[in-house]
Amino acid sequence: MILFRMIRKITRPTTAKCTLPMYMGFLISEPGSTSCTRLSEIMNISHDSVNRFLEREAFESVDLFNECKDNLNIKGSIAC
């Protein structure tokens, strides 16, 4: 089981079955494209639960990076 230190505050209590650690674990482990439908299939929860979770908090890729960056070994960079 993966445990995450919560940097980003949740704005209000959730009633959805989808959680931030569940969502982040899915993003890290899914080799292909991600979707609400795919997460709901893997975790055996409703698509609507995943969708409500994502709509409520509006997570972006930078949030995942900020949560995981202490565990990454980053060497060099690419200028955009």
Image (cartoon, rainbow, N blue to C red):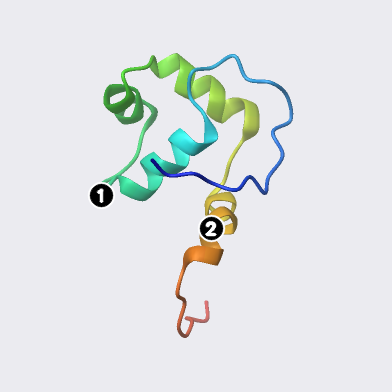
Label 1's element?
loop
Residue closer to the observer: 3 or 41: 3
Near mark 1 (Cα within 10 A), the count class, few <14, some 14-19 or many ≥20, is few
Label 2's element?
helix
Which of the two discs, 1 and 2, labels the residue nearer the N terminus? Answer: 1
Identify the residue at horizontal 59%, vertical 57% (top origin): 66
In this rendering, position of residue 6 left or right of residue 71:
right
Q: Position of residue 51 (x, y in %)?
A: 49, 23
Q: Which residue is mark 2?
A: 65
Identify the residue at horizontal 39%, vertical 28% (top origin): 36
Q: How many marks?
A: 2
Q: Is residue 77 above or below residue 37?
A: below
Cα gap from disc 1 to disc 2, whole angstroms: 17 Å
Residue placed furthest toward the bottom: 76
Tag 1: amino acid: Pro
Tag 2: amino acid: Phe
Identify the residue at horizontal 37%, vertical 17% (top origin): 45
Q: Which residue is mark 1?
A: 31
Q: Quadrant of the N terminus?
A: top left
Q: Position of residue 46 (x, y in %)?
A: 39, 14
Callout 1–callout 2 Cβ contact below 8 Å: no
Near mark 2 (Cα within 10 A), the count class, few <14, some 14-19 or many ≥20, is few
Q: Position of residue 79 (x, y in %)?
A: 52, 81
Q: Position of residue 17 (x, y in %)?
A: 48, 18
In this rendering, position of residue 59 left or right of residue 27:
right
Identify the residue at horizontal 37%, vertical 40% (top origin): 26
Residue 15: quarter of image: top right
Q: Which numbered disc covers residue 54?
A: none
Q: Is residue 67 above or below residue 72?
A: above
Q: Is residue 13 above or below residue 22?
A: above
